Amino acid sequence: MGMAVALSGCNDDTGKSSDKGSDAAASKTPSESSKSAAPESPSGDQPAVAGWQTQTSKKHHFRYDVPAKAKKWKLLPEETALSYLDKKGKPIVVMTAAANYREGGCPSSPNPKALGEAGKGQLATVGTTGGGKEGSLQENARNWAGNWGFAAYGGEDHKPKIKVSKPKPWKHGGIDGYTATAEVTVTNRPGSCVPPKAVVHSIAQKLPDGTMHGWVIYADQGVPKALSGAEIKKIMSTVRATGD
């Protein structure tokens, strides 16, 4: 499956991210420091959709919005990692700067391969990943979509059926990259909390230093309160480069 490509550099930190002195500015301006309880958003970036919550990944150079807390969306601390492990205990996929939809709403049977905030019964998860230089941007877009679908919806123990689209150009919000979609059919996992299907969308961008970074949303489908295609599209429309 070319998994190694998507895995390369999952935990790399390019060391290129810079806060552009925002911390110093915050300490000097009371109005700024009073905002420190807000989600990680060092440039004071406003949500693209009024009333939504903004999440920022300085490491992977993405910023995006999700609906308000009242809509059951929760932003996780930027550094909090979500991952799924293989049989040897190594991460298949890792994401940070994440957000969850309806966490704990219907926790599926405990998944021993889920680490951190993954597998908490949420109906959808969004986050950022990447950092490696291997493969093309198109390949990474497909791998991130397919690998998250595989890992989050069964893994090696209950291999789901995965159909990944051809990568398409994605030019929005200062990103000149690619997007891919994985359609997941869940197999061999009976239970009212396990969705019959899921969908994964990726957005991949390449930084000037040659490293590739991904934004990923994976969402249960065919269950009550599942995210609709229109809602997913609206969230994806807010994805933008951090500009540093």
Image (cartoon, grey):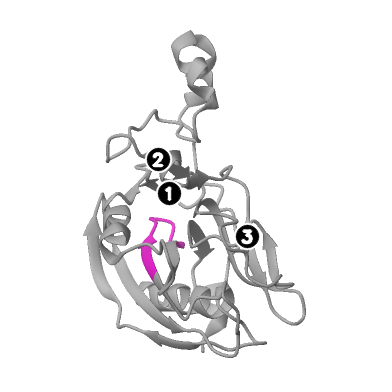
The magenta stretch spans which residues?
201-214
Front residue of this view, candidates 77 and 136: 77
For marks 3 and 2, the one nearer the N-term is 2
The spot of residue 238 in percent (x, y) is: 29, 49
Instruction: Using the numbered discs, state the Cα–Cα distance from disc 2 to disc 1 in whole angstroms.
Output: 22 Å
For marks 2 and 1, the one nearer the N-term is 1
**Residue tagged by mark 2?**
68
Instruction: Using the numbered discs, state the Cα–Cα distance from disc 3 to disc 2 in whole angstroms.
Output: 19 Å
Looking at the image, residue 149 lies above or below residue 96: below
Question: In what quadrant of the picture does the C terminus appear?
Answer: top left
**Among the 4 quarters of the image, the one containing residue 65:** top left
The spot of residue 192 in percent (x, y) is: 56, 75
Q: Which mark is residue 61?
A: 1
Amino acid type assigned to the residue bearing label 2 in the image: Ala
Q: Confirm whether the magenta stretch covers residue 98.
A: no
**Residue tagged by mark 3?**
120
157 to the left or right of 97: right
For marks 1 and 3, the one nearer the N-term is 1
**Among the 4 quarters of the image, the one containing residue 216:** bottom left
